[in-house]
């Protein structure tokens, strides 16, 4: 008698249907349609894990830009000033500072402004 993958096939099918739970209609009940749905879902998940990073950075930049504008400085001058002052803070940290510790963000703006003005005075 030959072996025919009976238990392995059943286990694979159970694993597939477990992952398809929550899909609409035949997508959660039929093997072929469900598998196609799963392949697509995994592709979207892969893509969006990368897009999420891009989206968050854009959000942080927008927040920092708004906070800098409120204090009378453009985003690009602010970042340039921080670079000149050798302050290496990432956008996420600056965004959090702008929201939760505005007094610290004010100091950063002052430091950046002073550096930019010092460079402008040299030239």
Image: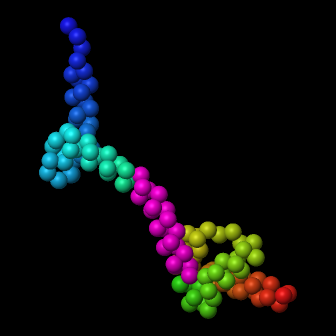
In this orientation, which residue lies closer to the viewer: 64 or 50? 50
In this orientation, which residue lies closer to the viewer: 20 or 98? 20
Q: Residue furthest right?
A: 122
Dividing the picture into quadrants, the one containing residue 115 is bottom right
What count of labels does the image hold?
0
Q: Is residue 103 visible?
A: no
Spot occupied by residue 15 in the image (x, y as percentages of width and height): 26, 37
Spot occupied by residue 3 in the image (x, y as percentages of width and height): 24, 14
* Residue 80 lies within the magenta run: no
Q: Is residue 50 visible?
A: yes
The structure residue drawn at horizontal position 65% and vertical position 69%, both measured from the top left corner, is 89
Spot occupied by residue 112 in the image (x, y as percentages of width and height): 71, 82
Horizontal arrangement in the rendering, residue 118 relative to residue 51 (left or right): right
Dividing the picture into quadrants, the one containing residue 79 is bottom right
Q: Which quadrant is home to the C terminus?
A: bottom right
Horizontal arrangement in the rendering, residue 110 relative to residue 11 (left or right): right
Horizontal arrangement in the rendering, residue 8 relative to residue 106 (left or right): left
Q: Residue furthest bottom?
A: 72
Horizontal arrangement in the rendering, residue 46 relative to residue 24 (left or right): right
The structure residue drawn at horizontal position 22% and vertical position 44%, both measured from the top left corner, is 34
Dominant SS type (magenta): helix
Spot occupied by residue 117 in the image (x, y as percentages of width and height): 77, 88
Looking at the image, residue 69 lies above or below residue 20: below
* Residue 57 lies within the magenta run: yes
The structure residue drawn at horizontal position 61% and vertical position 68%, both measured from the top left corner, is 90
In this orientation, which residue lies closer to the viewer: 106 or 117? 117
Looking at the image, residue 54 lies above or below residue 18: below
The range drawn in magenta is 46-65
């Amino acid at each position: 008698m030959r072996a025919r993958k009976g238990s392995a096939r059943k286990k694979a099918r159970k694993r597939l249907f477990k992952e398809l739970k929550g899909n609409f209609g035949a997508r959660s009940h039929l093997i072929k349609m469900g598998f196609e749905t799963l392949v697509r879902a995994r592709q979207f998940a892969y893509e969006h894990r990368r897009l999420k990073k891009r989206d968050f950075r854009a959000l942080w930049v927008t927040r920092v830009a708004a906070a800098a504008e409120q204090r009378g400085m453009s985003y690009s001058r602010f970042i340039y000033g921080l670079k000149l002052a050798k302050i290496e803070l990432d956008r996420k940290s600056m965004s959090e500072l702008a929201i939760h510790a505005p007094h610290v963000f004010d100091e950063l703006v002052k430091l950046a402004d002073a550096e930019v003005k010092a460079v402008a005075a040299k030239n």
